[in-house]
Image: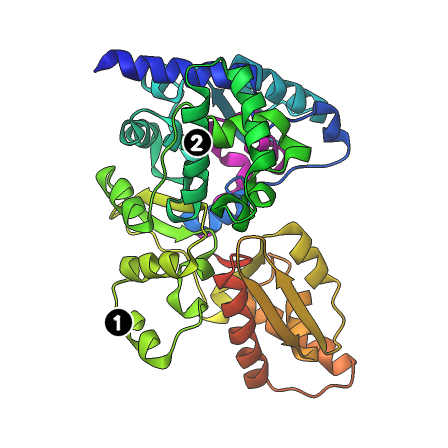
Amino acid sequence: MGEPRLDLEAAVAAQYVSYPFPPRDPAEEERRLITTTLGDLERASDLLWGGRRRLDTLRVLDAGCGTGDSTIYMAAQAPRAQVVALDASAASLAVTRQRAQARGLANVEIVNASLLDLPGLGLGPFDYVVCSGVLHHLPDPPAGLRVLVDVLHPYGGLGLMLYARHGRVPVYQVQELLRRLSGAAPLAERVTLAAEVLAVLPERHLFKVARLEQQVLDLSVYGDAGLVDLLLHACDRAYTVEEVHAFLGAASLELLDFHRPVLYRPESYPLTDALRERAAVLPEAERQAVAELLNGRMIKHELYAAPAGDGRRAPGPQEPPSRVRPRLYEPGVAAWFRRLQPVAQPFRLESTEGFTITLDLSAADCALLAGVDGERSLASVLGHAADVLRGAGIATSTDDLETAWARLAGELHAAGYLGYAWA
């Protein structure tokens, strides 16, 4: 049983040596900082510690960092935090190192090793572990997850990305097609073959209908490395929501939240009243499974997890307004909200992840959102909005502002754009 596992590990390692993923140019660091969901330390801190941990005190691990997107983002957010970038591909780590140097980041430690080697490296414990798109490429994903838990601080947590099974059905069809056509051909030859197959794939094929080329295979950005990672990977599996819960439970972890909760709620999809009532009484994990099946096109699960039963609880809207600070996480969305003037206007956000937010913002809504700076308590946000509206000659009551906030915050939190920290 040992040899096949070693063969798979070697094949995966060789793949990323030849085709580091995602392909990045260190010179681009001068022009942009690539953000990642799981690398957002404020979001992770709010979920794991209610925002009470200073980011610069964190010790974080990017397990299977690839070319360093999350590593660089985390290190840039907290220049005094300790960020360990671990990967089995020296070629990928070379890119990560060059990117860190281009940004002048002195808080990144590069470790060339397999995730499975962690127990013998003496690197832990870590407050936060990011493992995005790695566990599902291991011969034994549960063993990989157990390794990550073993290096986790007792009050730490993880940010994980796992492939979603239902939405990737077309991917696995094309993978099987390429295996049958290419046989044991060298990887470079299979890359050429994959490009040829995609060029002639019928427009009615599920891969084309689902627009997976646009969704996950942007060849203008990822090129051959994208083809290899998506369609020619040596080891690849995916998970349903039910399997995600079982996967975490076997490692004594519990799910804190999915990155986009809106996608995992049945009521986010068109349902009759009778179907909505049926879904409403299901256990939460079952509701999430139903939502995944209603969606039908999820290609990944991004989630946060922590050791089960440790009693932690992230703050939320149920707390008194003086006790919590609302926070907006997506930099672009947060910046847009901060510039809002107290003038009624429409807001529409279409996500590539399969949901749309449409709001008719009132003047009060705009004043509320513009006041969310991550530092003010919700009580201060409400008071600030009242002052702004008063200055604009708009009369409003505290009750009206609280009602408006509940509506806005519910929508934005479900979409993953807003959260809470303790004040």
For the point 70% across and 25% down, the residue is 25
Query: Are discs 2 and 1 less than 8 Å apart at CB?
Result: no
Say which of 358 and 311 sits in front.
358
Q: Is residue 115 above or below residue 245?
A: above
Q: Which mark is residue 281?
A: 1
Q: Is residue 372 above or below residue 229?
A: below
Under circle 2, the secondary element is helix
- x, y percentage for residue 166? 38, 48
Say which of 78 and 202 sits in front.
202
Q: Amino acid at mark 1?
A: Val
The residue identified by callout 2 is: 177
**Residue 371 in sight here:** no
User: Which image quarter: residue 114?
Assistant: top left
- Asked if the magenta segment contains residue 346, the reply would be no
User: Which image quarter: residue 69?
Assistant: top right
* Magenta-drawn segment: 50-77
